[in-house]
Amino acid sequence: MTDARETANEAPPAPVPLLDPREGIPPVTASPEAFAAVVEAFAAGTGPVAVDAERASGYRYGQRAYLVQLRRAGAGTALIDPVACPDLTALGDALAGTEWVLHAATQDLPCLAEIGMRPDQLFDTELAGRLAGFARVGLGAMVENVLGYALEKGHSAVDWSTRPLPDPWLRYAALDVELLVDLRDALEEELRTQGKLEWALQEFAAIVSAPPPAPRTDPWRRTSGMHKVRRRRQLAAVRELWTVRDRIAQERDVSPGRVLSDAAIVAAALAMPTSAQGLGALPGFGNRMSRRQLDAWQGAVDRARTLPERELPQAAPPLGGPPPPRAWADKDPAAAARLSAARAAVTRLAEELGLPQENLIAPDAVRRLCWEPPAEPSVTAVAERLVERGARPWQVELVSGVVAEALSAIAPDS
């Protein structure tokens, strides 16, 4: 198998361009009758089903699916328009008990769940590539390195809410699932050869059983450039501007960044202008912005300016765990020493096993363990803490010993 671990003098053959799906570009399924035919065909198919979804990130509000692609032996490839066919529950039911093959599954599973499709079993080819030690795990790189084909990836960032979808985009979408099952089979064999297949199966099962993520607290705090905003009233301006932008974006069904950029929000919060004219002079509030829009943004700034002190946001949200590691040396030098030792041990083990450190064990689990360690850092005590943080059995088995040893080597008064 060709991968990133080959020696420099073993030049791989040039990849073969994959230009068209084997059966050509299938018609887009956009009617109840066509959808029923797809359900019947895929229910009668055999083996795993390759699944992918295209969103319109950067163009539309939210992360809904605008195209769903599937391929299964005996059924061929289907391209489904979830705008015209918004409920795919019947297809999900038809695939019950079938293994789904996705690349970077956690990106697509939420939007698929919204339209009624949830897998019982999963094989994630990106995660499999990480566990197998591939340096590049994008779909194009994996298909090229493992199967020897070159995928054209020029349409990954287009506006998939466009209707009708151009043929070149549909060709690209169909090719994304063309070789996904072949890639799955090759990676399964590679993982088995490396003795890592059981690790991967546990990871896939954890993805399938994971609950939906909880809504983010204070999502406005994720505004790019927030590190420049220090004063509480300026933070209030960011919050007010973000909230107005989000409402407008949702009403218009456009990406929030197309309504107002993060950079413009931060600039207005730092300047706190007292008039729409002053706001219009700031970066991001240019000549194309109407007076009505400027008044809306200025109203948000004015609300932030007049809020009572008690209603201003705190400079930093309450932490749900330990402080940032950069502060540990001052707050708790012993904890900092434990974290340094544990990180070094995990890094060494990950390198020995040939997989990324973050896939060996979640960095947050290690941080929390080092901030509040068990009274006696035995292997059993460390294992219990890792299980509490959601570590899978294979991770606990591999990591508990080296972390316990690292913690035991740090004197309590160091």
Image (cartoon, grey):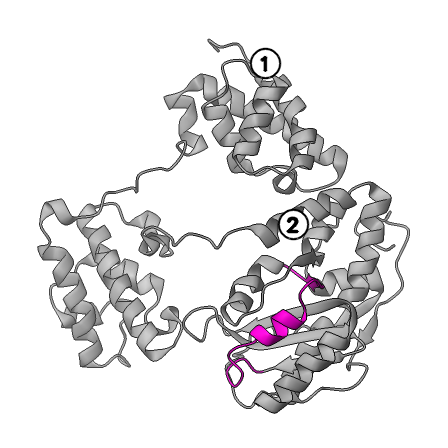
Residue at 26% from the left image edge and 63% from the top image edge: 243
Q: Is residue 273 visible?
A: no
Residue range corresponding to the magenta coloring: 81-104
Instruction: Please tell me which residue lies in front, 112 or 140.
Output: 112
Q: Is residue 115 visible?
A: yes
Q: Amino acid at mark 1?
A: Ser
The total of numbered circles placed on residues is 2
Which mark, by number, is residue 180? none
Which mark, by number, is residue 205? 2
Query: Where's the N terminus, which quadrant?
Result: bottom right
Residue position for label 1: 408
Q: Nearer the viewer, mark 1 or mark 2?
A: 2
Q: Amino acid at mark 2?
A: Ala
Along the horizontal axis of the image, is 260 left or right of 334?
Answer: left
Residue at 60% from the left image edge and 71% from the top image edge: 53
Instruction: Please tell me which residue lies in front, 316 or 103.
Output: 103
Secondary element at image label 2: helix
Which quadrant would residue 398 be assigned to in this image?
top right
Secondary element at image label 1: helix
Query: Is residue 270 placed above or below 51 in the rendered structure?
Result: above
Q: Which x, y percent locates residue 330?
A: 38, 22
Query: Is residue 236 placed above or below 320 in the rendered structure?
Result: below
Q: Which x, y percent locates residue 352?
A: 76, 33
The CA span between labels 1 and 2 is 33 Å
| Dot 2 crowding, Cα within 10 Å, few <14, some 14–19, many 20+ | some
Q: Is residue 82 magenta?
A: yes
Q: Which x, y percent locates residue 254?
A: 39, 76
